Image (cartoon, grey):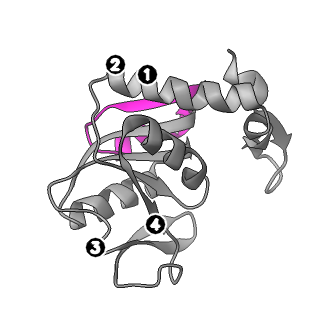
Amino acid sequence: MDLKSLIRDVPDFPKPGIVFRDITTLLRDPDGLKHAIDSFTQKFFHAGINADYIVGMESRGFIFGPPLAYQMGAGFIPVRKPGKLPSAVYCIEYELEYGTDCLEIHQDALHPGSKVLIVDDLIATGGTANATARLVKKSGCDVVGFGFIIELQNFQGRKNLPNVPIITLVEYL
């Protein structure tokens, strides 16, 4: 199945000159959504990735993380924006185009020594994924891989991630 054909291009969103890759059209297609989850699962197993936990980044990582965790027999852990988690958290600041932001994870979410797979819908610069990997390390765990539906290759986000397998399903230049 051609997943790229299920992703809508929205020109000039969120600002002029940007082409937004809209996955809502993929999500509404039952066969496409199933194919995406099944493809991730197969590619992770073929790459030898075995994880105790799937960590998904707010917010689209929450869409793909739980079904992937179910298929892989792993738990799911959300990484959120500040102030969204009710218990004690670790916070990691990371650079944005104009300023900084923070990601949080519950301090007791992961068991130290666990193997973690990080998933999200898209990788561009890799800043959010790198910050999430740092949160996982701060929790005493090992990142064993990354999974993204879409990779925007011209941003070279892979260069900003740890040296572990990175699985993508659709690539754009």
Mark 2: amino acid: His
Q: Is residue 24 magenta?
A: no
**Looking at the picture, does residue 104 appear above or below residue 64?**
below
Residue denoted by label 4: 95
Mark 4 and mark 3 residues within 8 Å of each other at the beta carbon: no
Find residue 6 and report its horizontal and vertical position in percent.
77, 28
Q: Which residues are magenta?
A: 152-173
Say which of 38 and 161 sits in front.
38
Task: State the residue at coordinates (27%, 35%).
Answer: 50
Instruction: Say whether disc 4 or disc 3 marks the residue closer to the N-terminus.
Output: 4
Residue denoted by label 3: 108
Q: Provide the secondary structure element on which disc 1 rests.
A: helix
Instruction: Say whether disc 2 or disc 4 marks the residue closer to the N-terminus.
Output: 2
Calculate the distance from the C-alpha at mark 1 to the C-alpha at mark 2: 6 Å
Query: Which marked residue is nearer to the observer: mark 2 or mark 4?
Result: 2
Mark 4: amino acid: Glu
Instruction: Say whether disc 1 or disc 4 marks the residue closer to the N-terminus.
Output: 1
Mark 1 and mark 4 residues within 8 Å of each other at the beta carbon: no
Find residue 81 and report its horizontal and vertical position in percent.
52, 73
Residue 172 shows in this picture: no
Calculate the distance from the C-alpha at mark 2 to the C-alpha at mark 4: 33 Å
Calculate the distance from the C-alpha at mark 3 to the C-alpha at mark 1: 30 Å
Mark 3 and mark 1 residues within 8 Å of each other at the beta carbon: no
Mark 1 and mark 2 residues within 8 Å of each other at the beta carbon: yes
Residue denoted by label 1: 42
